Amino acid sequence: MADNGANPRGPRCIALVGPFQSGKTTLLEALLARTNAIQRQGTVEAGTTVGDASKEARHHKMSVEVTVATTRFMGDDYTFLDCPGSVEFVHEMRAALPAVDAAVVVCEADERKVSQLQLVLRELEDLKIPRFLFLNKIDKADRRVRETLKLLQPASRARLLLRQIPIWKNEIITGFVDLALERAFVYREHVPSEVVPLDGEDLSREKEARFTMLETLADHDDELMEQLLEDIPPPRDKVFDDLAKEQRDGLICPVLIGVATRTNGVLRLLKALRHETHGVAETAKRLGVKSGNDPVAYVIKTFHTAHGGKLSVARVLAGQVGDGTTLNSPSQEAGRVSGVLKLVGQVTEKRGPAMAGETVGLGKLDHAKTGETLSAGKKVHAPVAEVAPFAPVLALAISAKDRKDDVKLGLAFTKLVDEDPSLSVHHNPETHEIVVWGQGEMHLRVATERLADRFGVAIERRTPSVGYRETIRKSITQRGRHKKQSGGHGQFGDVVLDIRPLPRSAGFAFEEKITGGVVPRNYIPSVEEGVIDGLKHGPLGFPVVDVAVALTDGSYHAVDSSDMAFRIAGRIGIVEALPQCSPVLLEPIHTVEIVCPSEATAKINAILSGRRGQILSFDTREGWEGWDVVRAKMPESEIGDLIIEVRSATAGVGSFTFKFDHMAELTGKQADQIVAARRAAE
Ligand SMILES: Nc1nc2c(ncn2[C@@H]2O[C@H](COP(=O)(O)OP(=O)(O)OP(=O)(O)O)[C@@H](O)[C@H]2O)c(=O)[nH]1
Ligand SMILES: [Mg+2]
């Protein structure tokens, strides 16, 4: 295996993924420094990394979106996608993954992060993306790597295969042995590790660990098994071939070790990527893209830059995309490429057309969206992947501080959602609130910070209103009379209404039982309109539902009656009647389905009970070893900030979905408080 000259597999696209704060952004920095794409390796603490360059990421010292950086190593281009680790920004990763050749899963020896690791690995397993585990921060390791692997193994369906073992000196890891290469290295800070002779105790540990590695490989290779049984040392190339093949087939996940902050283990990682990951040809095959001249590209990420307009980061899967190429998405024309850019974080550089395998920024594709498959050719290419965001779990009501910013706010939201479809914005016509839905507290906080920082809109934030309603429990007959005599033309309308409660979710029914034309036909629709007006705001302050109103009697005046007069009479009738009908508050109840690691299930049950939840069932989560699913009925008012408690009870990984179930009567102190709050707000 010669280590020189460009690799026939061409440019790679590699995702850096893994649990929250495991060191992905730092590893990207190390990879860029080691490949001379940057002069000096920055740090997250100092806010000098290529990744996380946005104001929000720097401020929170965490990744809030994908950073894309292309570098060159031994004659090949590598584009790294540094993905956020927080589950609240997981859509960034999920949308980026389909088009990558492989992933480096950065993790730590931390049992609290095993479930997060499992979530990440599950995505990769489902997409059949080959992956390495990079066990980072081993400068802080206080346990044996083999023990760490035991801890992490339940998170991975593929067997974790230790490729490197550390060399310990006085309880500190000073280097490592690569078991495939059979070579020992001593770490040096920010320069490549030094090869050292392997002897003494290290050599015997190496032999033992290598044998374990080979045994694992031999589980899927009979020939290797025979060699091991007969004590024949397998040729090095065979070992490498097996490693690569079994990784591609999803049987193993090789584990490398290192220290991203000190650039330790990074060169070996690059070499593993170079030799053991395939290029775009295999990825295109996995995605069902035929190689050929017709361009096909997958949109990994969308940016709206301050000055350059819209930028779509895309991986070219087939053909060639250059300035002027018109690309189509499955639903429409995406636009004409104006500018092809190489990206190293926020630094961009104009370049020529992009070939299959390359990952570049494409300018001005106004109608392209993240996750879409773009193509140019006679036939539009079918989507290579569809990545729907997870259902949102937290909402925030937002308004512009200054009414004149309303339009700006609307435009800003359009761009934010275009960049991040896991955010959604709804207008509540009843309360006139703009409600933003997102994946958690930090997700919404970052969205509102962007509104202020990038779009210059000062906003106010509130807890969104709960969809309370009210209904009645008693029937009544009520007269509604509107009479006004002011000089010339008067107004006259007179109706008698029979009002009675309807069963839950029956809505509103209007009936007319007029005989003898006491209310002329043509005025009857106005009476109904008046009743509907009156129901919009009941005596408790909420819309009234589940009532039937029958118009049974009334009178009119030949000159003074009009549509308007009867509408007012209808409204007077209902408004005067409702307080006498024993009004009662209705609150929305949803069925909630919470998923969580089993060790957190008891805590989740307690949370649900504390929030007036009625637990319906709990089961093991199908297809998810070590996870449970709890179902409950729960009032909407209690779901509002439920996610915050669920996340803290589950080391960040628990989540839920909910669906409206029914409206339920609410009485007593709680109801009184809600009504009082409503009155105070009016
Ligand atoms: N001791 C030690 N600390 C590290 C190492 N790598 C990263 N860190 C620190 O871990 C913290 C998180 O690093 P990041 O690179 O931001 O981690 P990340 O995985 O990108 O975080 P998110 O993207 O927010 O999930 C920072 O304080 C880093 O300095 C390492 O190898 N050793
Ligand atoms: Mg990061």
Image: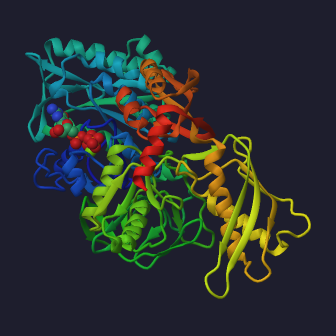
Residue 391 percent across, percent down from the top left: 51, 45
Q: Going 54% across and 48% down the picture, which residue do you hit?
A: 540
- x, y percent for residue 49: 17, 51
Where, quadrant-wise, is the N terminus in this rendering? top left
**Image position, residue 295 (x, y; %):** 51, 67
In the depicted structure, whether residue 315 falls above or below residue 229: below
Please tell me which residue is depicted at 61% across the width and 82% down the height of the picture. 486
Q: Total label count? A: 0
Up/down of 377 relative to 539, above or below: below
Q: Residue furthest right?
A: 516
- Residue 131: image quadrant is top left
Where residue 461 sits: x, y (%)? 34, 54
Q: In this view, which residue lies farthest toward the bottom?
A: 488
Out of 158 and 20, give the one closest to the viewer: 20
Ligand 2 image-quadrant field = top left
Looking at the rendering, in which quadrant would you find the C terminus?
Answer: bottom left
Image height check: is 22 above or below 533?
above
